[in-house]
Amino acid sequence: MEKPYPFDFFPEAFKKSMNKSMKKVKETGEVITGEAPVCDIEGNELWFRATLVPVKDNEGQIDHIIIVSVDINERKKMEEALIHAEKLKAMGVVTAGIAHDFNNILAVISGTTQVLKLNNEDNKKLMKGLRTIHKVSKDGAEIVRRMRIASRQETDTSEFKQVNIKSVLEHAIEFAKPRWMNIAKASGIDYDIDIDGIMELPTVMGIGAELTEVFTNIINNSMDAMDSGGCLSFRTWQNEGTLFISISDTGVGMSDEVKKRVFEPFYTTKRAKGSGLGMSVSYGIMKRHGGTIEVKSDEGEGTTFTLTLPIVESPVQQAESPVEHQEIKAKDLNVLIVDDNKEMHSFLESFFTDSGHKTKRVDSGSIAIEVLKTETFDLVLCDIVMPDISGYKVIEVLNRMDGRPKIGMMTGWSEEIKEYEGNNLNVDFIIMKPFELSVLAGHINDLGISA
């Protein structure tokens, strides 16, 4: 009587496959290799590779089968990380182009709205509509930003400052608090928020707003998973130069399929309520910060997200103050606007002329270079990506001129700038589309130029 495959801790589907493979080895004498996951006593998925080797007796008959198992868990993790990275890389290529086009569109909407707001302050009905349009355009820019973060591959740390994770985590909890309180009141359910496990920790290097976004995304996901109430608990600790944060809920949990795809861009189980960017954005932010984010969950038994960040010693840096509303202080400036988008010309021209300045607008780099041969300007605002001659070429010409004007670069495509910076890009400021006109005014004021 044949013995069944003995290892009951393997998944049922794999046991059937293994028994089928053993039968085939016995009948054909083939060596068969297969891979499968198993779970350890803590429920963690572990991968192994099993090779079935037939052993023959003196008469050439298959006497028994040797099974050689090899731990391939690390290899599988590396493969999954590589596949995820390739997906993000592909998304990044697509997103970069989409972001550039959308940012140009949003720049026109936002800029035109801001100009109209400046000139119609007494029209309350119009101002209400303009504020709505302005807010929606900023929301659109935020979606583009989140797409870029989700697909970001570089680990630029030039903007990093010292961050107190305990404060950031507490801020995220307070930020999300009104949402779950409203849900609780509306549904008549209770939530228990356990923050006793949040301890004082060393500072890390990063961007506080981005890390707040990570924690807020996880908190919101956890609250969505506990639509009948439950407990959300937080815990922090450190070990050997690494800081750990865990966020656990007692919600519905995740299936194996959801766990595998939870960090994929645009993957969502919330359909009408979710964009599918929250967790992929969080993954991108943690990677950029040199950290990790992992999930452990079982259906019906809740979910725990565990995040790590490296503890890095660095001198204290002062936080930058936000740019307040500003107007251009200089008078009678002569400004050249170079952009192939004529709608950009329109609102920028209105902004400057309404402030008493003179403008000239051209829609290509080649025309700009011709104009610069005969006319002088105090300030040149130049786009990067144009169909004939790029903004970089225009800037090269400007930097060779006697009496060089001040140069501001406008772009919706940050990658282009980073690639060119190594070639000594020489401009006075760079402003990302879409932008606030007060921020543009602030850049111009910082230059101290006058006509």
Image: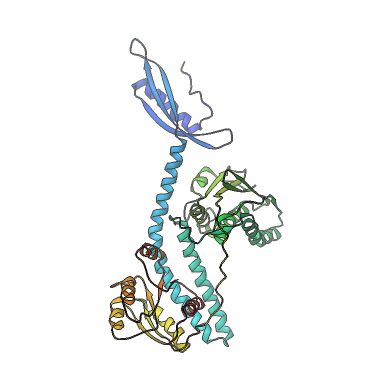
For residue 137, above or below residue 301: below
Position in image of residue 272 (x %, y %) = 53, 59
- Nearest the viewer among 92 and 398 is 398
Position in image of residue 419 (x %, y %) = 37, 62
Count of numbered badges drawn on the protein: 0
**Quadrant location of the C terminus?**
bottom left
Q: Is residue 343 visible?
A: no
- Nearest the viewer among 217 and 60 is 217
For residue 152, above or below residue 395: above
Horizontally, residue 222 falls left or right of residue 380, namely right
Q: Can residue 255 be seen in this view?
A: yes
Position in image of residue 78 (x %, y %) = 43, 42
Position in image of residue 399 (x %, y %) = 34, 75
Horizontally, residue 39 falls left or right of residue 333, namely right
Q: Residue at x 46, y 78 (%)?
A: 447
- Nearest the viewer among 375 and 171 is 375
In the picture as drawn, the residue positioned furthest to the top comes out as 58
